[in-house]
Amino acid sequence: MRRNWFPPAAARLRYGPPPTLTYTDYRERGSDRTVYTNLACDLGAQQDRRYIVIAVHWDDNTSQDNPLLSVTVGGVPATIIGELGSPASSGDRYDPAVALCFVEYDNANTTADIEMTFTYQCARMAMGVWQMHNGHEIELIDFDTEYLQVTHAGSSSITLDTIEGGVVVYAQTLRDPATTSGYSPLTRRYDDSVDTGKLGAEGLDVSGTPSGATTYGYSTIPQENTTGIAASFR
C-alpha cells in the first residue's frame, strides 16, 4: 500500500553528497492512549539541512485503515510517508501496524518532543528515530509496505528503487522480534518486545545503496501478522 507523494523525475536528478544516516533514539509506551508525547527525544547533533526519520509501531487493535493522523517533531509536522495495519480479515486480537515519517528540522536543538496522534486509542506504541544530513536537500526516492500472514516460518521482503550513495530505513511491527533472522545487508538498530506476545518493534537501516531496484528483508520470520515498511532516500 502506497500513500502520499513520490518526487517528480526532474527533481530526482539533483542530489548532493551521499547523506549520513545516524540512528539516535528509541521509545516505547505500554499505556492506552490516542496521543503519545515522547519527551526530549535525541535528534543527534545540529546539522545544516537536518532531516529526522521516525518509525512508528503500534497495536492496530481495531483494524482501521490509516489510523495515524499526525506526527510532529518539536511542533513541526512530519510527512507520513506510508503506513500499514493488519487487515480486518486477519482474525487476530493483536494486529501489528507500522508507519514511516520524515521532516526537515532546522532547529538547533539536539532534542525535541515527538508527538503522534491516532484516530483511536492504541493499546501500546513504540518508535525509532534517525537523523539524515548532507548539507543539501534530501529526497524520498521510493517506499513500499508488506503484510505477512503466516502461521509458521516465512520470509518478508520489500523492493525499492534506490540511488547510488543513498540510504534505506526499514521498520517492522510484529509480536516477538527476537525470532527474526537473515536481514543482511541491513543493520538492526533496535529489537524490542513492547508487550511480549502482543507487540514487538524492529528498526533497521543501510547506507551506501546501489542504483536500481534493490530488495531488502528477512529470510525468516516465524510469526503471523507482520507489517513492514521501507523507504529509500538520497
Image (cartoon, helix red, strand yellow):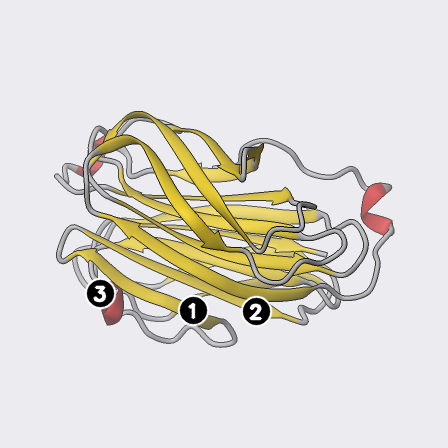
Left/right placement of residue 184 relative to residue 95 reads right
Mark 3 lies on a secondary structure that is loop
Residue 231 position within the rendered picture, expressed as x and y whole percent measured from the top left: 57, 52
Q: Is residue 216 visible?
A: no
How many numbered callouts? Answer: 3
* Structural distance between the alpha carbons of marks 2 and 3: 23 Å
Residue named by callout 2: 206
| Dot 1 crowding, Cα within 10 Å, few <14, some 14–19, many 20+ | some
**Marks 1, 3: nearer the viewer:** 1
Q: Quadrant of residue 98?
A: top left
Q: Are marks 1 and 3 in contact (CB under 8 Å)?
A: no
Does residue 31 sit above or below 223 in this rendering?
above
Which one is nearer the viewer's eye here, 35 or 122?
Answer: 35
Mark 1 lies on a secondary structure that is strand
Q: Quadrant of residue 65?
A: top left
Q: Which mark is residue 189?
A: 1
Residue named by callout 3: 222
Mark 2 lies on a secondary structure that is strand
Q: Earlier in the sequence, mark 1 or mark 3?
A: 1
Which one is nearer the viewer's eye here, 28 or 168?
Answer: 28
Q: Amino acid at mark 2?
A: Val
Q: Earlier in the sequence, mark 2 or mark 1?
A: 1
Q: Quadrant of the C terminus?
A: bottom right
* Residue pictured at 67% horizontal, 68% vertical: 209
